[in-house]
Amino acid sequence: MMKTVFRAFGLLLLVIVVQPASASADTCGGVYTVQPGDNLSGIADRMYQDAGKWRAIHNRNMTSIGPRPEGIRVGMRLSLPCLDGQPQGLPQGPVAATPTSVSVGDSEGDSNAAASGAINLLTGDDFAPFTAGMAPGGGLLAEVVSAAMAQAAPAEGYAIHWVNDWSSHFDPLLSNALLDLGFPWYKPACDTMPDSYRCRNFFFSEPMFETLMLLFAPKDRPFEFRRDEDIEGRTLCRPAGYLTFDLDQGGRRWVADNKITLLRPQTVRECFELVAAGRADAVAVNEFTGRSVMREHGFEAQFSEMPQPLAVLGLHVVVHKSHPRAAELLDMFDTGLRGIRDSGRYQAILDDHLTRFWRGH
C-alpha cells in the first residue's frame, strides 16, 4: 500500500488519522422543500433551533441558491447537513454517524524539503478550516487532497509539505519547481483578467470547494454594502499573501485605481485587531476563515458578517506553467478528485469537517 508522507520544512508535522465512524439506525439531515414565507434563518431556526446556522444551509446549497441568501424560491429542494444530530425525519436523510474518533501519530520519513522522486505538494497553516496543521486530517482540503492523491495512486508516491509563509509559495517554491503542486488557491476570472499574475503563471485543477468572500464589520460601526460604490473610500484589511483580485474584478478596480485603502498585516487575527482599533472599516476574508478567527480569538461579540458577499470563489490545486509535467500532474489530480466524488469519500470528508466547524470545534 502506498504511504502518504506529510513533511514540513525543518519541522516534523503531526499527522491526524480519522477512524471510521460507526453508524446508528437513525437518520440525520436530508432534503427540505422551501415553503411560502420561508427564509434561510427561519429554516435554520426550525431545523436546528439556531437561526445562525443559515450559513450552513446556504453553503451546502450554493449551486442552487446562488451567492445571495435571499435566492431561495418556493418549491426549491434544499439539502440540509446533519449538525449535532439535527434535523431528523426529513426525506432522503442519510444514516446518522457517531462522532469520529481521532488518533495522533508522528509523521513518517525525514524532514527534508522534498521527498526524492515523489510528487511534492505544498500547503500552509492558518487557513482553517481548509488547512490547519493540528486539525483532523490537516484540515478539510488537506484531507481532500490526500484522498484524491491516494485515489490517483501515482507510482512514485506523494508528500505534502507545510510552509507557513504563504507569500513564498508562488515564488520561489512553485515557480522554480522546488515543489510540484500547491493548494488551496483561489482562481481569478481568467477570461476577464488574463493578465493577472495567477492566470499568466499557473494552471488550475477542477475546483475542490467553493466559498464566499465576506466583509466582517464591527457591530458598533456598521455601514451599508449593497453596491460596489458603497465600499469606495473605505479601508479594508486582508493579510499579506492572500488574494486581492476579487477586489478588482468585475470592473471594481478598488485596489488598482486606489478607490480603497487596503491594509496587509501578516495574519487574519491582526486584521480583526486593526478593525477593532478603528484603523480599518472591515476584514475582507472568506466566510470560514473569518468565523474561525473570530471564534478562536474572542471577536464574536464585537463583529458581524455582512450578508452581501464580495465574491464566490473556488479553491484549487495549482501548478506553475513552466513545470515539465504540469498537464500530467493536474490530470492525475483531477482524476483522483473525480474518483473520490464518485465513491462518496469527498462528501464524507466535507460532512465531517463542516459538522465540526458548525459545532464550533
Image: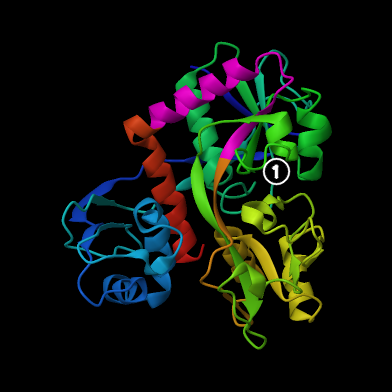
Q: Quadrant of residue 90?
A: bottom left
> Disc 1 marks which amino acid?
Gly
In the drawing, does residue 123 fall left or right of residue 139?
right
> For the point 67% across and 64% down, which residue is it?
284
Could you tell me if residue 298 is visible in this image?
A: no
Circle 1 Cα neighbour tier, 10 Å, few/some/many (<14 / 14–19 / ≥20):
many
In the drawing, does residue 313 fall left or right of residue 37?
right
Q: Nearer the viewer, residue 312 or 300?
A: 312
* Residue 48 image offset from top left, x and y in percent: 32, 71
Q: Main secondary structure of the magenta part?
A: helix
> For the point 74% across and 79% down, which residue is it?
276
Segment colored magenta: 316-340
Could you tell me if residue 277 is visible in this image?
A: yes
Q: Is residue 181 magenta?
A: no
> For the point 81% across and 24% down, which residue is it?
176
Q: Is residue 177 above or below residue 39?
A: above
* Residue 342 image offset from top left, x and y in percent: 33, 30
> For the point 69% across and 30% down, which residue is it?
202
* Residue 32 image offset from top left, x and y in percent: 22, 62
Q: Nearer the viewer, residue 127 or 138?
A: 127
Q: Is residue 330 magenta?
A: yes
